[in-house]
Image: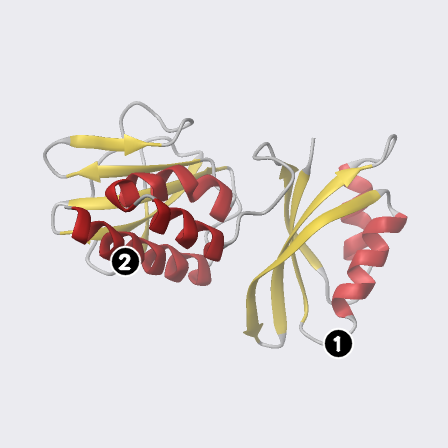
């Protein structure tokens, strides 16, 4: 099964190459890398999807990464969504192909796009409107004043955030145990939700 590694590293030439070499020497076979955030005090945050060679351990990958100067592992966990990273552009293409279901498709795509556990659309009075497979049976509606913000859900193992669809509806996504949602991820969620809403309007 693939593993997802979230790592903070210096945003300088050669840094990613040194990271890839260290992962390879520790028994990790890199499948894909996505830059999640960069420009923070000279640092970048990347998601690395990798497979472990027989006999290799996640702890060895972590040790190899943190042995590099300026590198910090933020998260490593098994990644059950498959052997690739689903990019925002691919999500927009999917939404455009299904305009009549754009908001529901967005919810379905959230786990792959953001490497989270589940997504949901929640209405103020109707409750759960649509949810991805791993979502709980009930997700509370909460008022969201800003475009996108971190929220609390009843299961304290879930780290969640939400964005407004309109005054009565929100889109929620959550991770169990971590990592926390970055500001760049909150911005992307708001942007993709806005696009899904625009795509869906002609079909409504």
Q: Position of residue 112 (x, y in %)?
A: 50, 42
Q: Position of residue 25 (x, y in %)?
A: 90, 50
Is residue 196 shown above or below 14?
above
Does 203 sit left or right of 125 as displayed? Answer: right
List the single residue furthest toward the top: 137
Residue 194 image label: 2
Which corner quadrant of the image does residue 10 belong to?
A: bottom right
SS type, badge 1: loop
Q: Quadrant of residue 15?
A: bottom right
Residue 146 is situated, as x and y percent measured from the top left of the image, at 23, 61
Q: Is residue 54 left or right of residue 1?
A: right
Labels 1 and 2: the sequence-earlier one: 1
91 or 165: which is nearer to us?
Answer: 91
Where is residue 53 shown, x and y percent of the image? 84, 36
**What mark, if any, has residue 13 been given in the picture?**
1
**Closer to the observer: label 1 or label 2?**
2
Q: Are marks 1 and 2 in contact (CB under 8 Å)?
A: no
Q: How is the image coloured?
A: secondary structure
Q: Quadrant of residue 102?
A: top left
Label 1 to label 2: alpha-carbon separation: 34 Å
Q: Secondary structure at mark 2?
A: helix
Q: Residue at x 77, y 56 (%)?
A: 66
| Residue 32 shows up from this direction | yes
Q: Nearer the viewer, residue 106 or 95?
A: 95
């Amino acid at each position: 099964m693939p593993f997802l590694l979230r790592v903070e590293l210096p945003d300088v030439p050669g840094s990613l190459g040194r990271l890839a070499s260290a992962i390879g020497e520790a028994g990790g076979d890199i499948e894909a890398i996505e830059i999640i955030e960069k420009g923070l005090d000279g640092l970048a945050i990347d998601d690395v999807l990798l497979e472990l060679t027989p006999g290799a351990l996640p702890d060895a990958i972590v040790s190899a990464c943190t042995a590099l100067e300026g590198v910090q592992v933020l998260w490593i966990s098994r990644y059950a969504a498959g052997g690739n990273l689903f990019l925002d552009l691919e999500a927009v293409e999917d939404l455009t192909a299904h305009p009549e279901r754009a908001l529901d498709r967005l919810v379905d795509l959230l786990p792959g796009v953001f490497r989270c556990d589940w997504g949901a659309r929640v209405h103020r009075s109707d409750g759960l409107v649509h949810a991805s497979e791993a979502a709980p049976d009930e997700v509370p509606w909460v008022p969201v004043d800003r475009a996108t913000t971190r929220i609390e859900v009843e299961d304290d193992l879930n780290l969640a955030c939400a964005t407004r669809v309109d005054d009565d509806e929100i889109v929620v996504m959550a991770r169990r145990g971590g990592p926390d949602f970055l500001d760049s991820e909150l911005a992307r969620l708001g942007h993709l939700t806005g696009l899904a809403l625009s795509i869906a309007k002609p079909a409504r």
